[in-house]
Image: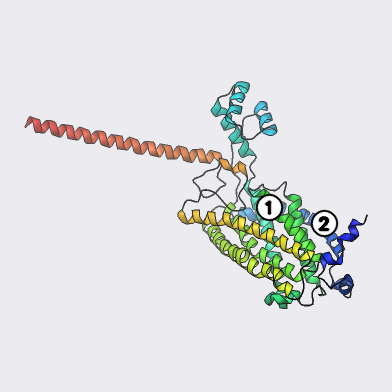
Amino acid sequence: MDLLPDIWREDYWLPPGVTWRDVEQLADSERARPRDLLIALPLALGFVALRYVFERFFAPPMGRCLGVKNRIQATAAPSPKLESFYTQRSRQPTQSEIVNLMSLCGKTQRQIETWFRLRRNQDRPCQTKKFGEAAWRFFFYITAFTAGLACLIDRPWFWDLRECWRKYPVQIMERAHYWYYMLELGFYGSLLLRISVDVKRKDFKEQVIHHLATIFLLSFSYCANYLRIGTLVMLLHDSSDILLESAKMFNYGTGWRRTCDTLFVVFTMVFLVTRLVIFPTKIIHTTLVLSMEDFKPFPGYYFFNVLLMVLQVLHIFWAGLILRMVYKFMKGKLEKDERSDEESDVEEEEDNNGRNVDQGGDHCWERSKDKLNSQRSMLTNNCVLNNLTNHRESVADKMRKAD
């Protein structure tokens, strides 16, 4: 029963020498109160509902304008036994399991492998669904970034980071910053609520960690009145996310390859500068070093910086994926999307020779078949030419002997 009061001990949340009474000198509307966070849950549910309306009525016409089309895929023939194995055991059977299924279903190995390939392709998310998700995040990030920049650009701590700690923690909270915090918190809450039904990415675990770390970071920084540095962290992250989601949107359309590549190059530069340069050298340096010019370390100080370090580790992980993709792009060997929007193992069936990871299995087979036919034609032509050459040389030899 005494655990809850202990959570709010002053030495956990506030620097030494500062008490809750000092913070309570401000009016209720001028200071951050922990109970304000309760509004984040209805906001998260509101974002889920708003996203449903957006993806249902607004994203489809936008996708049609960009040429987003769903592929026509061959469906796997009905097979109760194979379907039961697929849903209950594995979507990618091993060689020994395929042998058992051959005797169980009376099919050849090629037929079973083809059935599982087609069945996996059926579960792949369609282009319009992926476009709708990217478009929704793009419009939120660009709205949040624009609003955040508008309410921060004329604030002193936007230009001088030492202002983040001036008179801390007795700092007046502006209403615009309150709503900036709550809307960002509600949005990331909605992403966490929807993550199980969204398109599953290869970095699914990292995305979950990122959303949880962000929610904890926003909640703790709000309660501890780290509002000034918190707003800068949100603004910094939204700046590159806008470019990433816009690149995805054009990637799912047809005829926008050059636009997509350009946006991705710009995104790469902005991501590397903001996440690997500005974030550690400015934000983390500010919370680790500059904040200690006026205060001594306390538990909240360590907890806040640990959360920032978790985000930085994720930044390094994603930067590795992005740089690997850039390297393949420069070498002209880009086989599949290494970015954080790459889908899970259901995508492994796709064309490894194309730059678009969204080409279907049937299309891959057609391209391979065309390539095979082309090579066979070249081989045939070479054989014909060789035969003609040999025949001509033989005739010439006979003519010389006759002479």
Q: Say what secondary structure mark 1 lies in.
A: helix
Question: Residues at badges 1 and 2 in contact (C-beta under 8 Å)?
Answer: no
Callout 1, which amino acid? Gln
On the image, the x and y values in percent for residue 239 come to: 65, 65
Give the residue displayed 89% in from the left and 75% down from the top: 25
- Which badge, 1 or 2, is on the more N-terminal residue? 2
Q: Which residue is mark 2?
A: 41
Q: Nearer the viewer, mark 1 or mark 2?
A: 1
Q: Is residue 388 above or below residue 230?
A: above
34 relative position to 145: left or right: right
- Residue sitting at x 78%, y 71%: 176
- Return the x and y of residue 400 as percentages of the image width and height: 9, 33
Q: Would you place residue 119 above or below residue 54 in this image? A: above
Distance Cα–Cα, label 1 vs label 2: 20 Å
Residue 386 - label = none
Is 228 displayed left or right of 76 in the figure? right
What number is the disc on residue 207? 1
* Kind of residue sitting beneath label 2: Leu
- Reply above or below: 305 against 120: below
Question: Which one is in front, 9 or 221?
Answer: 9
